[in-house]
Image (tube, helix red, strand yellow):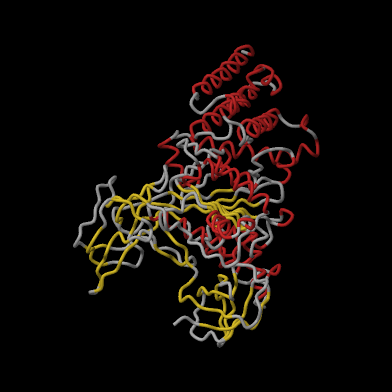
Protein backbone atom coordinates (compact mmCIF):
# COMPACT_ATOMS: atom_id res chain seq x y z
CA UNK A 1 0.00 0.00 0.00
CA UNK A 2 1.38 3.44 -0.92
CA UNK A 3 2.02 5.83 1.96
CA UNK A 4 -0.49 8.68 2.24
CA UNK A 5 -0.17 11.87 4.25
CA UNK A 6 -1.40 15.45 4.42
CA UNK A 7 0.39 18.74 3.82
CA UNK A 8 1.00 20.78 7.00
CA UNK A 9 3.50 23.35 5.78
CA UNK A 10 4.58 24.93 2.47
CA UNK A 11 7.76 27.01 2.09
CA UNK A 12 8.59 27.63 -1.56
CA UNK A 13 9.68 24.29 -3.09
CA UNK A 14 9.67 22.66 0.36
CA UNK A 15 6.51 20.87 1.51
CA UNK A 16 6.13 19.18 4.90
CA UNK A 17 3.59 16.36 5.18
CA UNK A 18 2.49 14.41 8.26
CA UNK A 19 1.11 10.90 8.55
CA UNK A 20 3.92 9.55 6.37
CA UNK A 21 4.83 6.48 8.46
CA UNK A 22 6.62 3.93 6.27
CA UNK A 23 7.96 6.48 3.80
CA UNK A 24 11.61 6.16 2.78
CA UNK A 25 14.38 8.68 2.18
CA UNK A 26 14.53 9.87 -1.43
CA UNK A 27 11.19 8.24 -2.20
CA UNK A 28 9.33 9.89 -5.03
CA UNK A 29 5.90 11.22 -4.09
CA UNK A 30 2.92 12.90 -5.75
CA UNK A 31 1.87 16.13 -4.03
CA UNK A 32 -1.58 17.76 -4.00
CA UNK A 33 -4.57 17.43 -6.29
CA UNK A 34 -2.45 17.89 -9.42
CA UNK A 35 0.04 15.18 -8.41
CA UNK A 36 3.15 17.36 -8.47
CA UNK A 37 6.44 15.43 -8.53
CA UNK A 38 8.38 15.54 -5.25
CA UNK A 39 11.17 13.74 -3.41
CA UNK A 40 11.52 13.07 0.32
CA UNK A 41 14.77 14.57 1.60
CA UNK A 42 14.25 14.28 5.38
CA UNK A 43 12.07 12.22 7.74
CA UNK A 44 11.31 13.19 11.35
CA UNK A 45 8.83 10.93 13.12
CA UNK A 46 5.78 10.76 10.90
CA UNK A 47 6.69 13.99 9.10
CA UNK A 48 8.33 13.95 5.68
CA UNK A 49 10.17 16.96 4.22
CA UNK A 50 9.63 16.99 0.47
CA UNK A 51 11.34 19.03 -2.23
CA UNK A 52 8.83 19.56 -5.03
CA UNK A 53 10.11 19.66 -8.61
CA UNK A 54 7.33 21.93 -9.82
CA UNK A 55 6.07 25.30 -8.64
CA UNK A 56 4.06 24.99 -5.42
CA UNK A 57 1.90 28.07 -5.91
CA UNK A 58 -1.74 27.17 -5.30
CA UNK A 59 -0.99 24.27 -2.97
CA UNK A 60 -2.70 24.45 0.41
CA UNK A 61 -2.37 22.63 3.76
CA UNK A 62 -4.58 19.57 4.03
CA UNK A 63 -4.01 18.34 0.48
CA UNK A 64 -2.80 14.76 0.16
CA UNK A 65 0.71 13.49 -0.46
CA UNK A 66 1.00 9.97 -1.87
CA UNK A 67 4.17 7.87 -2.06
CA UNK A 68 5.11 5.92 -5.16
CA UNK A 69 7.19 3.29 -3.37
CA UNK A 70 10.34 4.04 -5.37
CA UNK A 71 13.05 6.71 -5.67
CA UNK A 72 13.27 9.42 -8.33
CA UNK A 73 14.20 7.44 -11.44
CA UNK A 74 14.71 7.97 -15.14
CA UNK A 75 13.41 5.90 -18.03
CA UNK A 76 16.21 4.32 -20.08
CA UNK A 77 15.69 2.89 -23.54
CA UNK A 78 15.60 3.75 -27.26
CA UNK A 79 14.17 7.19 -28.00
CA UNK A 80 16.32 9.29 -25.65
CA UNK A 81 18.62 10.79 -28.29
CA UNK A 82 17.41 14.02 -29.86
CA UNK A 83 15.07 14.74 -26.95
CA UNK A 84 14.85 17.90 -24.83
CA UNK A 85 14.04 17.23 -21.17
CA UNK A 86 13.58 19.34 -18.09
CA UNK A 87 15.45 18.67 -14.84
CA UNK A 88 13.41 15.57 -13.93
CA UNK A 89 13.29 14.01 -17.43
CA UNK A 90 9.95 15.41 -18.48
CA UNK A 91 10.00 15.63 -22.33
CA UNK A 92 9.34 19.28 -23.11
CA UNK A 93 8.37 18.83 -26.81
CA UNK A 94 5.94 16.02 -25.92
CA UNK A 95 4.44 18.10 -23.08
CA UNK A 96 3.96 20.97 -25.54
CA UNK A 97 2.11 18.65 -27.95
CA UNK A 98 0.07 17.19 -25.09
CA UNK A 99 -1.03 20.63 -23.85
CA UNK A 100 -1.66 21.91 -27.40
CA UNK A 101 -4.07 19.04 -27.94
CA UNK A 102 -6.06 19.91 -24.77
CA UNK A 103 -5.78 23.71 -24.72
CA UNK A 104 -4.12 25.06 -27.91
CA UNK A 105 -3.86 28.64 -26.59
CA UNK A 106 -1.68 27.43 -23.66
CA UNK A 107 0.73 25.26 -25.69
CA UNK A 108 3.75 27.43 -24.82
CA UNK A 109 3.31 26.76 -21.08
CA UNK A 110 4.40 23.67 -19.15
CA UNK A 111 1.42 22.72 -17.03
CA UNK A 112 1.97 21.51 -13.49
CA UNK A 113 1.45 17.82 -12.93
CA UNK A 114 1.53 17.01 -16.65
CA UNK A 115 2.09 13.25 -16.89
CA UNK A 116 3.81 12.49 -20.20
CA UNK A 117 6.14 9.48 -20.60
CA UNK A 118 9.81 10.39 -20.97
CA UNK A 119 10.17 7.96 -23.89
CA UNK A 120 7.42 7.92 -26.56
CA UNK A 121 5.30 4.82 -26.03
CA UNK A 122 3.79 4.59 -29.50
CA UNK A 123 7.03 4.81 -31.50
CA UNK A 124 8.25 1.49 -32.90
CA UNK A 125 11.88 0.46 -33.20
CA UNK A 126 13.27 -2.32 -35.38
CA UNK A 127 14.80 -4.88 -33.01
CA UNK A 128 17.50 -7.32 -34.19
CA UNK A 129 18.45 -10.10 -31.72
CA UNK A 130 22.13 -10.42 -30.80
CA UNK A 131 25.07 -8.17 -31.61
CA UNK A 132 25.86 -8.51 -35.30
CA UNK A 133 29.17 -6.62 -35.17
CA UNK A 134 30.71 -8.96 -32.60
CA UNK A 135 28.86 -12.09 -33.70
CA UNK A 136 27.39 -12.44 -30.21
CA UNK A 137 23.92 -13.88 -29.68
CA UNK A 138 22.27 -15.29 -26.57
CA UNK A 139 20.91 -18.82 -26.81
CA UNK A 140 17.44 -19.70 -25.51
CA UNK A 141 17.91 -21.97 -22.52
CA UNK A 142 21.28 -20.47 -21.67
CA UNK A 143 22.24 -18.25 -18.76
CA UNK A 144 21.93 -14.46 -19.04
CA UNK A 145 23.31 -11.85 -16.69
CA UNK A 146 23.25 -8.12 -16.12
CA UNK A 147 24.53 -6.14 -19.07
CA UNK A 148 24.28 -8.95 -21.65
CA UNK A 149 23.24 -7.57 -25.05
CA UNK A 150 19.84 -8.95 -26.08
CA UNK A 151 19.74 -7.15 -29.41
CA UNK A 152 20.26 -3.96 -31.39
CA UNK A 153 18.03 -1.04 -32.36
CA UNK A 154 19.04 1.69 -34.82
CA UNK A 155 18.05 4.58 -32.56
CA UNK A 156 19.25 7.37 -34.86
CA UNK A 157 21.22 7.61 -38.09
CA UNK A 158 24.44 7.77 -36.00
CA UNK A 159 23.84 5.57 -32.96
CA UNK A 160 23.01 1.89 -32.66
CA UNK A 161 21.22 1.30 -29.36
CA UNK A 162 22.18 -1.88 -27.52
CA UNK A 163 19.24 -3.38 -25.63
CA UNK A 164 20.78 -4.88 -22.49
CA UNK A 165 19.65 -7.04 -19.60
CA UNK A 166 19.05 -4.52 -16.74
CA UNK A 167 21.57 -4.38 -13.87
CA UNK A 168 21.00 -6.70 -10.90
CA UNK A 169 19.06 -9.10 -13.12
CA UNK A 170 20.09 -12.64 -14.11
CA UNK A 171 18.60 -16.04 -14.86
CA UNK A 172 17.83 -18.45 -17.72
CA UNK A 173 16.70 -17.08 -21.08
CA UNK A 174 13.34 -18.73 -21.87
CA UNK A 175 12.36 -16.67 -24.92
CA UNK A 176 13.88 -13.96 -27.13
CA UNK A 177 11.79 -11.90 -29.53
CA UNK A 178 12.41 -12.43 -33.26
CA UNK A 179 13.53 -9.62 -35.55
CA UNK A 180 10.81 -7.01 -36.00
CA UNK A 181 9.18 -3.74 -34.91
CA UNK A 182 8.49 -3.23 -31.20
CA UNK A 183 7.61 -0.39 -28.86
CA UNK A 184 9.62 0.18 -25.68
CA UNK A 185 6.82 -1.44 -23.66
CA UNK A 186 6.66 -4.63 -25.72
CA UNK A 187 8.24 -7.72 -24.18
CA UNK A 188 11.38 -8.71 -26.06
CA UNK A 189 12.64 -11.46 -23.73
CA UNK A 190 11.55 -13.73 -20.89
CA UNK A 191 13.98 -14.74 -18.16
CA UNK A 192 13.36 -17.42 -15.56
CA UNK A 193 14.81 -16.98 -12.08
CA UNK A 194 14.07 -19.18 -9.05
CA UNK A 195 11.08 -20.74 -10.78
CA UNK A 196 9.50 -17.44 -11.76
CA UNK A 197 9.43 -15.97 -15.29
CA UNK A 198 10.22 -12.26 -15.64
CA UNK A 199 9.49 -10.11 -18.69
CA UNK A 200 12.23 -7.91 -20.14
CA UNK A 201 11.31 -4.87 -22.20
CA UNK A 202 13.43 -2.47 -24.26
CA UNK A 203 13.19 0.13 -21.49
CA UNK A 204 13.77 0.04 -17.76
CA UNK A 205 14.04 2.54 -14.91
CA UNK A 206 17.06 3.45 -12.81
CA UNK A 207 17.30 5.68 -9.67
CA UNK A 208 19.24 8.83 -10.53
CA UNK A 209 21.17 9.06 -7.26
CA UNK A 210 22.63 5.56 -7.63
CA UNK A 211 25.65 5.07 -9.91
CA UNK A 212 25.15 2.28 -12.46
CA UNK A 213 27.43 -0.72 -11.86
CA UNK A 214 30.33 -1.80 -14.10
CA UNK A 215 32.86 -4.62 -14.24
CA UNK A 216 36.10 -2.67 -13.74
CA UNK A 217 37.51 0.83 -14.07
CA UNK A 218 40.37 1.64 -16.44
CA UNK A 219 42.99 4.38 -16.53
CA UNK A 220 41.94 7.17 -18.95
CA UNK A 221 44.72 7.03 -21.56
CA UNK A 222 43.03 8.29 -24.74
CA UNK A 223 42.55 12.04 -25.17
CA UNK A 224 39.13 13.49 -25.89
CA UNK A 225 39.94 15.51 -29.00
CA UNK A 226 38.03 18.80 -29.01
CA UNK A 227 39.65 20.59 -31.94
CA UNK A 228 40.67 23.48 -29.66
CA UNK A 229 44.45 23.84 -29.68
CA UNK A 230 44.93 25.18 -26.17
CA UNK A 231 42.83 22.32 -24.77
CA UNK A 232 44.10 19.38 -26.81
CA UNK A 233 47.79 20.29 -26.87
CA UNK A 234 48.53 22.24 -23.70
CA UNK A 235 45.83 21.02 -21.27
CA UNK A 236 44.41 17.76 -22.68
CA UNK A 237 41.24 16.07 -21.45
CA UNK A 238 41.09 12.26 -21.43
CA UNK A 239 38.05 10.15 -22.27
CA UNK A 240 36.57 9.33 -18.88
CA UNK A 241 38.16 12.39 -17.28
CA UNK A 242 36.84 15.25 -15.18
CA UNK A 243 37.25 18.96 -15.80
CA UNK A 244 35.92 22.39 -14.94
CA UNK A 245 35.73 25.70 -16.80
CA UNK A 246 35.52 28.52 -14.22
CA UNK A 247 35.23 32.12 -15.26
CA UNK A 248 33.52 35.41 -14.60
CA UNK A 249 30.68 36.95 -16.59
CA UNK A 250 31.44 37.37 -20.30
CA UNK A 251 34.54 35.18 -20.42
CA UNK A 252 33.04 32.68 -22.85
CA UNK A 253 32.04 29.66 -20.74
CA UNK A 254 28.90 28.94 -22.75
CA UNK A 255 30.60 29.33 -26.14
CA UNK A 256 33.41 27.01 -25.02
CA UNK A 257 30.88 24.41 -23.87
CA UNK A 258 29.02 24.71 -27.19
CA UNK A 259 32.29 24.08 -29.03
CA UNK A 260 33.02 21.07 -26.81
CA UNK A 261 29.58 19.62 -27.48
CA UNK A 262 29.77 20.23 -31.23
CA UNK A 263 33.36 19.30 -32.05
CA UNK A 264 34.54 16.81 -29.42
CA UNK A 265 35.22 13.22 -30.44
CA UNK A 266 32.59 11.84 -28.03
CA UNK A 267 29.98 9.50 -29.51
CA UNK A 268 27.17 10.81 -27.28
CA UNK A 269 26.78 14.36 -25.91
CA UNK A 270 24.55 15.34 -22.99
CA UNK A 271 24.19 19.10 -22.47
CA UNK A 272 22.69 20.26 -19.17
CA UNK A 273 21.53 23.86 -18.92
CA UNK A 274 21.47 24.01 -15.15
CA UNK A 275 20.06 27.27 -13.82
CA UNK A 276 21.37 29.44 -16.65
CA UNK A 277 19.47 32.43 -18.02
CA UNK A 278 16.55 31.64 -20.29
CA UNK A 279 17.99 33.50 -23.28
CA UNK A 280 21.20 31.42 -23.14
CA UNK A 281 19.26 28.16 -23.04
CA UNK A 282 17.03 29.41 -25.86
CA UNK A 283 20.17 29.90 -27.94
CA UNK A 284 21.15 26.27 -27.26
CA UNK A 285 17.67 24.98 -28.15
CA UNK A 286 17.67 26.99 -31.38
CA UNK A 287 21.24 26.26 -32.49
CA UNK A 288 21.76 22.59 -31.63
CA UNK A 289 19.01 21.23 -33.94
CA UNK A 290 20.69 23.17 -36.81
CA UNK A 291 24.24 22.03 -36.10
CA UNK A 292 25.84 19.38 -38.30
CA UNK A 293 28.06 16.76 -36.71
CA UNK A 294 31.57 17.45 -38.08
CA UNK A 295 32.59 13.78 -37.89
CA UNK A 296 29.70 12.33 -39.94
CA UNK A 297 27.94 15.28 -41.62
CA UNK A 298 24.64 14.23 -40.01
CA UNK A 299 22.45 16.29 -37.62
CA UNK A 300 24.18 16.84 -34.27
CA UNK A 301 20.95 16.13 -32.38
CA UNK A 302 21.16 12.50 -33.57
CA UNK A 303 23.80 11.97 -30.86
CA UNK A 304 22.71 14.62 -28.34
CA UNK A 305 20.35 14.89 -25.37
CA UNK A 306 19.49 18.35 -24.03
CA UNK A 307 18.38 18.96 -20.44
CA UNK A 308 16.92 22.43 -20.01
CA UNK A 309 16.39 23.75 -16.51
CA UNK A 310 16.69 27.52 -16.61
CA UNK A 311 16.94 29.95 -13.67
CA UNK A 312 13.19 30.67 -13.75
CA UNK A 313 12.25 26.98 -13.50
CA UNK A 314 11.74 25.21 -10.13
CA UNK A 315 14.95 25.32 -8.10
CA UNK A 316 14.70 21.76 -6.79
CA UNK A 317 14.47 20.37 -10.35
CA UNK A 318 17.74 22.20 -11.01
CA UNK A 319 19.34 20.20 -8.21
CA UNK A 320 18.04 16.95 -9.75
CA UNK A 321 19.08 17.77 -13.33
CA UNK A 322 22.74 16.93 -12.69
CA UNK A 323 21.86 13.42 -11.49
CA UNK A 324 19.43 12.85 -14.36
CA UNK A 325 22.11 13.82 -16.89
CA UNK A 326 24.88 11.65 -15.44
CA UNK A 327 22.53 8.63 -15.21
CA UNK A 328 21.71 8.98 -18.93
CA UNK A 329 25.45 9.25 -19.61
CA UNK A 330 26.19 6.05 -17.66
CA UNK A 331 23.48 4.21 -19.63
CA UNK A 332 25.15 4.94 -22.98
CA UNK A 333 28.56 4.27 -21.42
CA UNK A 334 27.33 0.75 -20.62
CA UNK A 335 26.70 0.23 -24.35
CA UNK A 336 30.39 0.88 -24.98
CA UNK A 337 30.15 4.51 -26.11
CA UNK A 338 32.28 7.51 -25.15
CA UNK A 339 29.93 10.06 -23.58
CA UNK A 340 30.62 13.73 -22.90
CA UNK A 341 28.44 15.49 -20.32
CA UNK A 342 28.72 19.26 -20.05
CA UNK A 343 26.93 21.10 -17.24
CA UNK A 344 26.35 24.85 -17.45
CA UNK A 345 26.75 25.59 -14.63
CA UNK A 346 27.50 23.71 -11.41
CA UNK A 347 27.49 27.03 -9.53
CA UNK A 348 23.75 27.39 -10.19
CA UNK A 349 23.30 23.78 -9.06
CA UNK A 350 25.16 24.61 -5.82
CA UNK A 351 22.92 27.66 -5.35
CA UNK A 352 19.91 25.35 -5.61
CA UNK A 353 21.44 23.18 -2.87
CA UNK A 354 21.90 26.32 -0.77
CA UNK A 355 18.30 27.43 -1.20
CA UNK A 356 16.86 24.00 -0.40
CA UNK A 357 19.17 23.71 2.62
CA UNK A 358 17.92 27.07 3.88
CA UNK A 359 14.30 25.95 3.51
CA UNK A 360 15.15 22.85 5.55
CA UNK A 361 16.62 25.14 8.23
CA UNK A 362 19.99 23.37 8.12
CA UNK A 363 23.08 24.97 9.64
CA UNK A 364 24.87 26.90 6.88
CA UNK A 365 28.61 26.59 6.24
CA UNK A 366 30.87 28.91 4.22
CA UNK A 367 28.98 31.60 2.27
CA UNK A 368 25.66 30.00 3.22
CA UNK A 369 26.26 26.77 1.32
CA UNK A 370 25.36 23.53 3.14
CA UNK A 371 28.15 21.66 4.89
CA UNK A 372 27.70 18.73 2.50
CA UNK A 373 28.49 20.82 -0.63
CA UNK A 374 31.91 19.20 -1.08
CA UNK A 375 30.56 15.67 -0.79
CA UNK A 376 27.79 16.36 -3.33
CA UNK A 377 30.32 17.76 -5.82
CA UNK A 378 32.52 14.71 -5.21
CA UNK A 379 29.57 12.34 -5.78
CA UNK A 380 28.92 13.94 -9.16
CA UNK A 381 32.50 13.90 -10.49
CA UNK A 382 33.18 10.40 -9.14
CA UNK A 383 30.65 9.04 -11.64
CA UNK A 384 33.04 9.87 -14.48
CA UNK A 385 35.45 7.24 -15.74
CA UNK A 386 36.45 4.79 -18.43
CA UNK A 387 35.08 1.35 -17.62
CA UNK A 388 34.65 -2.22 -18.78
CA UNK A 389 30.87 -2.62 -18.89
CA UNK A 390 28.97 -5.53 -17.40
CA UNK A 391 27.86 -8.41 -19.59
CA UNK A 392 28.77 -9.88 -22.97
CA UNK A 393 30.16 -9.09 -25.46
CA UNK A 394 32.89 -7.07 -23.75
CA UNK A 395 32.47 -3.32 -24.13
CA UNK A 396 34.58 -0.37 -23.01
CA UNK A 397 32.84 2.97 -22.55
CA UNK A 398 33.52 6.26 -20.83
CA UNK A 399 31.78 9.21 -19.22
CA UNK A 400 33.66 12.53 -19.37
CA UNK A 401 32.32 15.25 -17.08
CA UNK A 402 32.97 18.94 -17.72
CA UNK A 403 31.27 21.51 -15.52
CA UNK A 404 31.22 25.27 -15.98
CA UNK A 405 31.66 27.23 -12.74
CA UNK A 406 30.48 30.83 -12.38
CA UNK A 407 32.37 32.31 -9.41
CA UNK A 408 31.03 35.73 -8.37
CA UNK A 409 33.43 38.41 -9.61
CA UNK A 410 35.72 35.73 -11.05
CA UNK A 411 36.95 34.82 -7.55
CA UNK A 412 38.36 31.28 -7.77
CA UNK A 413 38.69 31.06 -3.97
CA UNK A 414 34.90 30.91 -3.44
CA UNK A 415 33.53 27.56 -2.16
CA UNK A 416 32.13 26.01 -5.35
CA UNK A 417 35.32 26.59 -7.37
CA UNK A 418 37.70 25.63 -4.56
CA UNK A 419 35.79 22.41 -3.77
CA UNK A 420 35.49 21.53 -7.46
CA UNK A 421 39.27 21.82 -7.87
CA UNK A 422 39.69 19.04 -5.30
CA UNK A 423 37.84 16.50 -7.43
CA UNK A 424 38.79 17.31 -11.03
CA UNK A 425 41.97 16.68 -12.98
CA UNK A 426 41.63 19.32 -15.72
CA UNK A 427 41.23 23.00 -14.89
CA UNK A 428 40.55 25.38 -17.79
CA UNK A 429 40.60 28.80 -16.10
CA UNK A 430 38.90 31.57 -18.06
CA UNK A 431 40.40 35.03 -17.66
CA UNK A 432 38.38 38.25 -17.74
CA UNK A 433 41.39 40.28 -18.95
CA UNK A 434 41.96 37.95 -21.89
CA UNK A 435 38.27 38.06 -22.80
CA UNK A 436 38.15 41.86 -22.67
CA UNK A 437 41.25 42.02 -24.89
CA UNK A 438 39.40 39.76 -27.39
CA UNK A 439 41.68 36.77 -26.89
CA UNK A 440 39.41 33.71 -27.34
CA UNK A 441 39.19 31.12 -25.99
CA UNK A 442 40.07 33.22 -22.93
CA UNK A 443 41.79 30.33 -21.11
CA UNK A 444 44.63 31.51 -18.88
CA UNK A 445 47.65 29.28 -19.59
CA UNK A 446 49.27 30.27 -16.27
CA UNK A 447 46.36 29.15 -14.06
CA UNK A 448 45.14 26.16 -16.08
CA UNK A 449 46.47 22.62 -15.71
CA UNK A 450 45.86 19.02 -16.79
CA UNK A 451 46.80 15.91 -14.85
CA UNK A 452 46.22 13.76 -17.97
CA UNK A 453 49.24 14.99 -19.97
CA UNK A 454 51.38 12.01 -18.92
CA UNK A 455 48.55 9.52 -19.47
CA UNK A 456 47.72 10.65 -23.03
CA UNK A 457 51.37 11.07 -24.13
CA UNK A 458 51.55 7.53 -25.47
CA UNK A 459 48.46 8.09 -27.65
CA UNK A 460 49.99 11.27 -29.11
CA UNK A 461 53.32 9.54 -29.67
CA UNK A 462 51.77 6.56 -31.47
CA UNK A 463 48.98 8.34 -33.35
CA UNK A 464 50.40 11.77 -34.17
CA UNK A 465 54.12 12.35 -33.48
CA UNK A 466 56.65 11.09 -30.90
CA UNK A 467 57.85 14.66 -30.34
CA UNK A 468 54.49 15.94 -29.05
CA UNK A 469 55.47 16.08 -25.37
CA UNK A 470 58.80 17.79 -26.13
CA UNK A 471 57.20 20.59 -28.15
CA UNK A 472 54.28 20.99 -25.74
CA UNK A 473 56.56 21.38 -22.72
CA UNK A 474 58.79 23.86 -24.54
CA UNK A 475 55.77 25.99 -25.51
CA UNK A 476 54.56 26.06 -21.90
CA UNK A 477 58.04 27.03 -20.66
CA UNK A 478 58.20 29.91 -23.16
CA UNK A 479 54.78 31.19 -22.01
CA UNK A 480 55.82 30.94 -18.34
CA UNK A 481 59.10 32.75 -19.03
CA UNK A 482 57.22 35.46 -20.94
CA UNK A 483 54.96 36.07 -17.92
CA UNK A 484 58.05 36.63 -15.73
CA UNK A 485 59.59 38.98 -18.31
CA UNK A 486 56.38 41.03 -18.56
CA UNK A 487 56.79 41.96 -14.88
CA UNK A 488 60.28 43.26 -15.65
CA UNK A 489 59.05 45.10 -18.76
CA UNK A 490 56.51 46.97 -16.63
CA UNK A 491 59.36 48.33 -14.51
CA UNK A 492 62.20 49.00 -16.96
CA UNK A 493 60.77 48.59 -20.47
CA UNK A 494 61.57 46.20 -23.32
CA UNK A 495 64.80 47.90 -24.46
CA UNK A 496 66.63 46.92 -21.28
CA UNK A 497 66.11 43.20 -21.95
CA UNK A 498 68.69 40.93 -23.53
CA UNK A 499 68.15 39.80 -27.11
CA UNK A 500 67.43 36.29 -25.88
CA UNK A 501 64.66 37.61 -23.62
CA UNK A 502 63.31 39.71 -26.48
CA UNK A 503 63.15 36.54 -28.56
CA UNK A 504 61.16 34.85 -25.79
CA UNK A 505 58.63 37.73 -25.90
CA UNK A 506 58.46 37.49 -29.70
CA UNK A 507 57.90 33.72 -29.70
CA UNK A 508 55.28 34.03 -26.95
CA UNK A 509 53.47 36.59 -29.12
CA UNK A 510 53.57 34.14 -32.02
CA UNK A 511 52.22 31.36 -29.79
CA UNK A 512 49.38 33.56 -28.53
CA UNK A 513 48.34 34.93 -31.93
CA UNK A 514 49.12 31.94 -34.12
CA UNK A 515 48.32 29.02 -31.82
CA UNK A 516 46.34 29.87 -28.67
CA UNK A 517 43.79 32.21 -30.25
CA UNK A 518 41.04 30.36 -32.12
CA UNK A 519 37.85 31.51 -33.82
CA UNK A 520 34.99 29.05 -33.26
CA UNK A 521 32.96 30.78 -35.98
CA UNK A 522 35.65 30.48 -38.69
CA UNK A 523 35.00 27.51 -41.02
CA UNK A 524 38.70 26.52 -41.06
CA UNK A 525 39.88 27.64 -37.62
CA UNK A 526 36.90 26.28 -35.64
CA UNK A 527 38.36 22.77 -35.52
CA UNK A 528 42.02 21.76 -35.77
CA UNK A 529 42.98 18.10 -36.04
CA UNK A 530 45.73 16.87 -33.69
CA UNK A 531 48.06 16.67 -36.70
CA UNK A 532 47.43 20.29 -37.66
CA UNK A 533 47.82 21.44 -34.06
CA UNK A 534 51.24 19.85 -33.72
CA UNK A 535 52.48 21.05 -37.13
CA UNK A 536 51.61 24.68 -36.27
CA UNK A 537 53.25 24.32 -32.86
CA UNK A 538 56.39 22.75 -34.38
CA UNK A 539 56.63 25.57 -36.94
CA UNK A 540 56.63 28.20 -34.18
CA UNK A 541 58.97 26.31 -31.81
CA UNK A 542 61.40 25.45 -34.68
CA UNK A 543 61.48 29.16 -35.53
CA UNK A 544 62.33 29.89 -31.89
CA UNK A 545 65.14 27.35 -31.83
CA UNK A 546 66.67 28.57 -35.07
CA UNK A 547 66.31 32.22 -34.06
CA UNK A 548 67.90 31.46 -30.69
CA UNK A 549 70.93 30.13 -32.55
CA UNK A 550 71.14 33.36 -34.56
CA UNK A 551 70.84 35.48 -31.40
CA UNK A 552 73.87 33.65 -30.00
CA UNK A 553 75.76 34.77 -33.12
CA UNK A 554 74.90 38.41 -32.36
CA UNK A 555 71.89 38.92 -34.65
CA UNK A 556 69.14 41.07 -33.14
CA UNK A 557 65.52 39.97 -32.89
CA UNK A 558 64.36 42.97 -34.94
CA UNK A 559 66.72 41.91 -37.75
CA UNK A 560 65.42 38.35 -37.61
CA UNK A 561 61.84 39.56 -37.92
CA UNK A 562 62.73 41.88 -40.82
CA UNK A 563 64.41 39.00 -42.66
CA UNK A 564 61.21 36.96 -42.45
CA UNK A 565 59.02 39.74 -43.82
CA UNK A 566 55.70 38.35 -45.00
CA UNK A 567 56.56 34.88 -43.66
CA UNK A 568 56.10 36.12 -40.09
CA UNK A 569 52.47 37.05 -40.82
CA UNK A 570 51.96 33.77 -42.71
CA UNK A 571 52.99 31.81 -39.61
CA UNK A 572 50.22 33.53 -37.63
CA UNK A 573 47.65 33.10 -40.40
CA UNK A 574 48.34 29.40 -40.98
CA UNK A 575 45.61 28.45 -38.49
CA UNK A 576 42.78 29.89 -40.63
CA UNK A 577 44.28 29.79 -44.15
CA UNK A 578 45.39 26.13 -44.24
CA UNK A 579 42.60 23.52 -43.91
CA UNK A 580 43.00 20.26 -42.01
CA UNK A 581 43.42 18.27 -45.25
CA UNK A 582 46.27 20.42 -46.67
CA UNK A 583 48.87 20.10 -43.91
CA UNK A 584 51.74 19.85 -46.40
CA UNK A 585 51.36 23.63 -46.82
CA UNK A 586 52.37 24.10 -43.17
CA UNK A 587 55.49 22.02 -43.85
CA UNK A 588 56.24 24.22 -46.88
CA UNK A 589 55.80 27.37 -44.81
CA UNK A 590 58.01 25.98 -42.07
CA UNK A 591 60.73 25.16 -44.65
CA UNK A 592 60.56 28.72 -46.05
CA UNK A 593 61.00 30.15 -42.54
CA UNK A 594 63.97 27.86 -41.93
CA UNK A 595 65.56 28.80 -45.29
CA UNK A 596 65.11 32.54 -44.58
CA UNK A 597 66.86 32.18 -41.22
CA UNK A 598 69.63 30.05 -42.77
CA UNK A 599 70.26 32.73 -45.41
CA UNK A 600 70.48 35.38 -42.68
CA UNK A 601 73.06 33.26 -40.88
CA UNK A 602 75.01 32.89 -44.14
CA UNK A 603 75.05 36.69 -44.60
CA UNK A 604 76.63 37.19 -41.18
CA UNK A 605 79.19 34.45 -41.80
Residue located at (52% from left, 32% from top): 534
Q: Position of residue 334 (x, y in %)?
A: 39, 56
Q: Position of residue 464 (x, y in %)?
A: 44, 34
* Number of numbered discs: 0
Residue located at (39% from left, 63% from top): 204
Location of the N terminus (image quadrant):
bottom left
Is there any visible trace of residue 540 in the rendered image?
yes
Q: Position of residue 230 (x, y in %)?
A: 58, 40
Q: Residue furthest left?
A: 141
**Residue in front for this viewpoint, 384 or 58:** 58
Whether residue 31 sits left or right of residue 251 in the image: it is: left
**Residue in front for this viewpoint, 237 or 347:** 347
Indicate the quadrant where residue 101 lies: bottom right
Residue located at (46% from left, 54% from top): 80
Is there any visible trace of residue 447 in the rendered image?
no
Q: Is residue 131 above or below residue 523?
A: below
Amino acid sequence: MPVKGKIVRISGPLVVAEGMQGAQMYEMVRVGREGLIGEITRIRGDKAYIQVYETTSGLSPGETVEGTGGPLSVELGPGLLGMIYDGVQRPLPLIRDYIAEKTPHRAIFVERGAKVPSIPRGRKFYFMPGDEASGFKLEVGGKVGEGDVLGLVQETSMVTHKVMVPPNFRGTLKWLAPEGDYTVEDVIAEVEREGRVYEVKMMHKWPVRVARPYKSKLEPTEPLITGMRILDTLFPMAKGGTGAIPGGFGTGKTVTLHALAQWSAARIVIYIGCGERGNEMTEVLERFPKYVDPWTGKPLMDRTILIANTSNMPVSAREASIYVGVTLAEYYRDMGYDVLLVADSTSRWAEALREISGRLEEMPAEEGYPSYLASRIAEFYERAGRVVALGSPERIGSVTLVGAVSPPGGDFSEPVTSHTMRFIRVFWALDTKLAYSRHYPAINWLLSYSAYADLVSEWWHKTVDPSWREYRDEAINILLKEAELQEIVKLIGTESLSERDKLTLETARLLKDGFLKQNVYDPIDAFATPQKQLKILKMIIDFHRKAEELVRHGITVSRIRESLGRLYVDMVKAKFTIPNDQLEKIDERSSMVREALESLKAEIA
